Amino acid sequence: MNKKNVILLIAHEGYQQIEYGVTREVLHNKGIHVTTASDQPGTATAKDSSSTNVDITVAKINPEKYDGLFLIGGPGALTWLNNEQVHTLLREMIALKKPYGAICISPRILAEANVLGGKKATGWDKDHQLSAIFQKYAVTYLPHHVVVDGNVITATGPEAAQEFGEAIAKALDSNP
C-alpha cells in the first residue's frame, strides 16, 4: 500500500501554529506524509512568530500527486490563501474525488471557492458571521468542533486540531 501524502496549506504570514502543528503531528503519527504548502516559498511565519519551512508553493501543486488538501487558519489565511489559484486546486480535488477541508477561518475560503454548496460544515465563528456567509453559498452551518460531510472536513480552530487531524486520517484511510 502506498503511503498517503497530504498538503497542509498555510499562509506565508499569520498561519495558526497550533492548528498546523497538532494536525501535522496527528497525521505523522498515523504514518501519513505531510507536505507543507504556502503561497510563497521559503519560511512561513505563524501568528505567534514561530515558523516552518515551506515544501512547495501553491503554484507548483499537482493535485494528482496528493491524497488530500487541507487549509490551516489564522489571521493571514483570508489575506494570502483566498485566491483563484487555491480555489482552482480545491475544485481539482473534488474532480479527483479526494478529501479536502479547512480549519478555523479557512472554511470561509472553501465557501467562497464554491466547494461547499449543499454540504454541512463548521468553522471559526467568534464574529458571528459564519452562518450568514455559509447561507450565501448554500452551506449548512453546524456549530460542532469538526464536521465531516463526504470528502469534506471542516473544524472550528485550535481546540479542534487533534480531532481535525484524526478525521483527515480516517478519510484518507477510507479513500483508496
Image: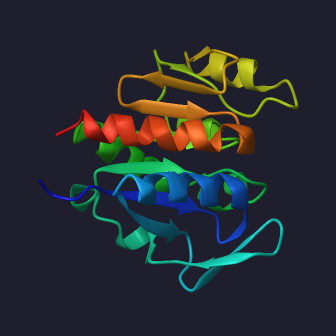
Left or right of 102 on screen, residue 118: left
Q: In the image, what residue occupies the spot 36% across and 30% down? A: 151
Left or right of 89 on screen, residue 62: left
Point out the residue furthest to the bottom here: 42
Q: In the image, what residue occupies the spot 45% across and 78% down? A: 55
Q: Is residue 102 visible?
A: yes
Point out the residue furthest to the front here: 29
**The C terminus sits in image quarter:** top left
Closer to the camera in the image, 34 or 85: 34
Quarter of the figure with residue 51:
bottom right
Measured as percent of width and height from the top left, residue 146 is found at: 59, 28
Q: In the image, what residue occupies the spot 70% across and 25% down? A: 133
Q: How is the image coloured?
A: rainbow
Measured as percent of width and height from the top left, residue 16 is found at: 72, 57
Q: Is residue 84 visible?
A: no
Quarter of the figure with residue 18:
bottom right
Closer to the camera in the image, 113 or 97: 97
Point out the residue furthest to the left here: 1
Up-down relation of residue 71 to residue 36 (above or below): above
Quarter of the figure with residue 162:
top right
Measured as percent of width and height from the top left, residue 38 is found at: 54, 69
Measured as percent of width and height from the top left, residue 101 is found at: 48, 39
Count the marks: how many? 0
Closer to the camera in the image, 28 or 10: 28
Up-down relation of residue 99 to residue 30 (above or below): above
Q: In the image, what residue occupies the spot 75% across and 34% down? A: 124
